[in-house]
Image (cartoon, rainbow, N blue to C red):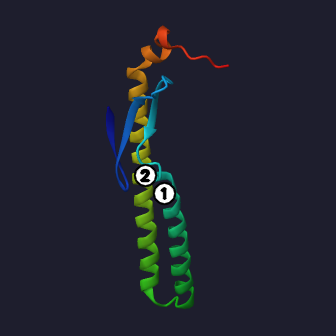
């Protein structure tokens, strides 16, 4: 069973499943590279912003560099805002899964106990 959540680079699905060894249910994100992509986007943004600032400093009279700077910042702000919304939606989906299965988490089946030795 999976709950779909929209991510910035495509749909993310939260899947629940039990491990074959009887280790219990696990919630995992289908796209594990989303965090790495997000950090790469921040790095790319910083590099592009430095390049635009250097060009702007060389030719302060040209207004196009100022517009490019503002557009770059606005685009990054929109991306960051959408990322925060997506993160909120993922945590809401996880919270929903946990609250719906709280009784099973609190009182697991007694026949499948694990020993932690």
**Residue topped by disc 2:** 83
Between disc 2 and disc 1, the foreground one is 1
Q: Tell me: 113 left or right of 9.
A: right
Crowdedness near tag 1: few (<14), some (14–19) or many (≥20) residues, C-alpha within 10 Å: some
What residue is drawn where x is 64% and y is 19%?
Answer: 116
Q: Element type at marker 2?
A: helix
Q: Element type at marker 1?
A: helix
What residue is drawn where x is 52% and y is 88%?
Answer: 60
- Residue 21, position as x, y percentages in the image: 49, 25
The residue positioned farthest toward the right in the image shown: 117
Camera-side residue of 104 and 5: 104
For residue 20, above or below residue 113 = below
Q: Tell me: 117 left or right of 89.
A: right
- Residue 72, position as x, y percentages in the image: 44, 71
The residue positioned farthest toward the front in the image shown: 21
What residue is drawn where x is 45% and y is 52%?
Answer: 34
Circles 2 and 1: CB atoms closer than 8 Å: yes
Q: Earlier in the sequence, mark 2 or mark 1?
A: 1
Instruction: Measure how far apart labels 2 and 1 are at the Cα level.
Output: 8 Å
For residue 65, above or below residue 20 = below
For residue 99, above or below residue 92 = above
Displayed quadrant of residue 98: top left
Rendered image: mark on residue 38: 1
């Amino acid at each position: 069973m999976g709950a779909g959540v929209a991510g910035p680079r495509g749909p993310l699905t939260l899947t629940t499943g039990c491990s074959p060894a009887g280790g219990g249910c696990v919630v995992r994100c289908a796209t594990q590279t989303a965090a790495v992509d997000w950090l790469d986007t921040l790095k790319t943004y910083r590099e592009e912003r430095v390049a635009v600032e250097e060009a702007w400093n060389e030719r302060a009279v040209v207004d196009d560099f100022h517009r490019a700077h503002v557009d770059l910042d606005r685009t990054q702000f929109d991306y960051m805002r959408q990322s925060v919304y997506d993160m909120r939606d993922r945590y809401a989906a996880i919270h929903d899964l946990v609250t719906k299965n709280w009784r099973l988490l609190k009182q697991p089946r007694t026949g499948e106990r694990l020993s932690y030795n």
